[in-house]
């Protein structure tokens, strides 16, 4: 026996992209159903970046899910660039006409979106296996899946593929209809989360002989630190003590002395990748978020790009249902990709500038150092970095 369901927009994936799209559509009176491979707890267990652009905050406001973000998020007007044992302040607000970013973990954004979805009573099928899309090249798209041993067939008007890099949506597109671009970096980030006060009230991005370091935070009592490590490293080989010693060795003397250490709550290694799939619409299937693109985490653009895709997609669908206009749908892919490629460029540039390649030739190290010196001594160069960091306009 197969159960049959019907919705207007079927969303694959309950990460931040899928949940935010669902919430914006719900507010516009468009019904939607989310199908998620994992459990809700599993989704909330993933630790991801935590810097929101102002436009992302505005979108979360419009979605009605920003109350806790405003109460608990930390507004940052700048960050610090560290190299040659010195920190240099990048005054984001001065350089961008008053813009800022908000430090608030992606896990918390996801938690707020899940709570809003539960309150709205919109359905989510968690722990869905064997998800299979059909018919998106015609006008009767849908998906089949299994939940608790029951086969379910869902019919819809449109499918939003918000199922991340490893999802089924992009993989369902015929190879000849899609083009992918990819760069894998020869190092990873070892991250540690701890209930310790952050070493500085601003984020520190550091280039060091021993590798890149990022000092970030989730709150005034919870820190998130990262170390560049070779891809051959295993998180299990890093005791907390080894992590803290390595971090301290890459900080300037004042930060090293101020660093408060404590037991880790989480430690994991993430690879770094640049990836774009083009186009982002295939008939009645749209890709959004990590399903279509990945940026290396330097600059924290991943979640913010997912938010801008969801903005364009929700607008396109609202125009379709309210005004019978297909313009937003027709332009969805081009609108997204124009912004995505600029964020890809910035993330690649910031990554290349701050990391030390294995066996890096001395000339490259000298060129990076010269560029860092240029960035911190030229208002024009600093303004370029700042306007990309706070987020380009939609
Ligand atoms: N069927 C249903 N759901 C799936 C499937 C599938 N076949 N494959 C994957 N999923 C789910 C995943 O379990 C996950 O919960 O899709 C969701 C995708 O969520 P994310 O990977 O968080 O991607 P996205 O919502 O686009 O968020 C982008 O997350 O990875 C970060 O850097 C990224 O911050 C950015 C943000
Ligand atoms: C994080 O806090 O996890 C974070 C912050 C800034 C980045 C990347 C990650 O650029």
Image: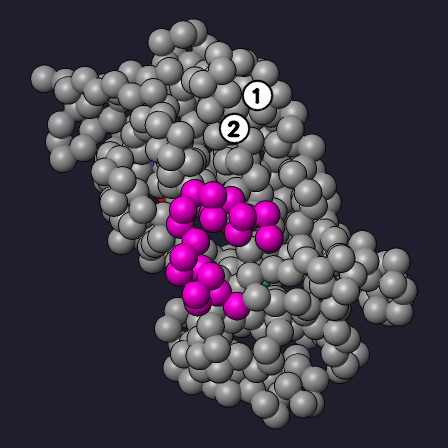
Q: Tell me if I can see residue 178 in this picture.
A: no
Q: Is mark 1 within 8 Å of ligand 1?
A: no
Q: Nearer the viewer, residue 309 or 295?
A: 309
In the displayed structure, 303 sits above or below 93; it is above
Main secondary structure of the magenta stretch: helix
Q: Nearer the viewer, residue 276 or 322?
A: 322
Which labelled disc corresponds to residue 237? none
Question: Residue at left 65%, top 25%?
Answer: 334
Q: Is disc 1 placed on a helix, strand or loop?
A: helix
Q: Confirm whether the magenta stretch covers residue 73.
A: yes
Image x and y of residue 203, in percent: 62, 71
Question: Residue at left 62%, top 21%?
Answer: 331
Question: Residue at left 47%, top 43%?
Answer: 62
Tell me the crowding category of disc 2: few under 14, some 14 to 19, or many 20 or more residues within 10 angstroms, Cα based. Answer: some
- Tags 2 and 1 in contact by the CB under 8 Å rule? yes
The mark nearer the N terminus, 2 or 1, is 2
The residue segment tinted magenta is: 54-74
Which residue is under mark 2? Answer: 315
Which residue is under mark 1? Answer: 328
């Amino acid at each position: 026996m197969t159960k049959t369901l019907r919705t207007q927009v079927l969303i694959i994936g309950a990460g931040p992209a899928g949940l935010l799209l669902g919430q914006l559509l719900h507010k516009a009176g468009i019904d939607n159903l989310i199908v998620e491979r994992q459990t809700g707890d599993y989704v909330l267990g993933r630790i991801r970046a935590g810097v929101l652009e102002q436009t992302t905050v505005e979108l979360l406001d419009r979605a009605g899910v920003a109350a806790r973000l405003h109460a608990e998020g930390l507004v940052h007007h700048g960050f610090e660039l560290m190299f040659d044992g010195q920190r240099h302040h990048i005054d984001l607000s001065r350089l961008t006409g008053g813009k800022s970013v908000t430090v608030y973990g992606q896990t918390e954004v996801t938690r707020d979106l899940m709570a809003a979805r539960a309150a709205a009573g919109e359905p989510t099928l968690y722990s869905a296996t064997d998800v299979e899309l059909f018919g998106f090249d015609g006008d009767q798209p849908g998906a089949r899946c299994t939940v608790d041993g029951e086969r379910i067939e869902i019919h819809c008007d449109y499918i939003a593929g918000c199922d991340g890099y490893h999802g089924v949506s992009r993989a369902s597109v015929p190879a000849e209809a899609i083009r992918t671009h990819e760069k894998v970096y020869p190092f990873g980030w070892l991250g540690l989360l701890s209930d310790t006060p952050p070493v500085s009230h601003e984020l520190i991005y550091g280039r060091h002989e021993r590798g890149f370091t990022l000092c970030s935070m989730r709150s005034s009592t919870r820190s998130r630190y990262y170390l560049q490590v070779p891809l051959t490293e295993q998180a299990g080989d890093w005791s907390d003590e080894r992590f803290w010693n390595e971090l301290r060795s890459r900080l300037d003397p004042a930060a090293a002395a101020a660093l408060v250490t404590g037991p880790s709550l989480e430690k994991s290694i993430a690879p770094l990748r640049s990836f774009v799939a083009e186009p982002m619409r295939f008939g009645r299937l749209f890709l959004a978020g990590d399903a279509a693109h990945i940026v290396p985490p330097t600059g924290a653009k991943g979640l913010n790009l997912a938010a801008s895709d969801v903005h364009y997609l929700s607008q396109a669908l609202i125009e379709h249902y309210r005004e019978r206009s297909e313009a937003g749908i027709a332009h969805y892919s081009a609108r997204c990709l124009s912004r995505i490629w600029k964020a890809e460029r910035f993330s690649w540039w910031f990554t290349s500038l701050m990391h030390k390649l294995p066996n890096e030739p001395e000339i490259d190290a000298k060129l990076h150092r010269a560029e860092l010196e240029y960035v911190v001594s030229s208002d024009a160069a600093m303004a370029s970095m700042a306007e990309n960091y706070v987020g380009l306009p939609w």
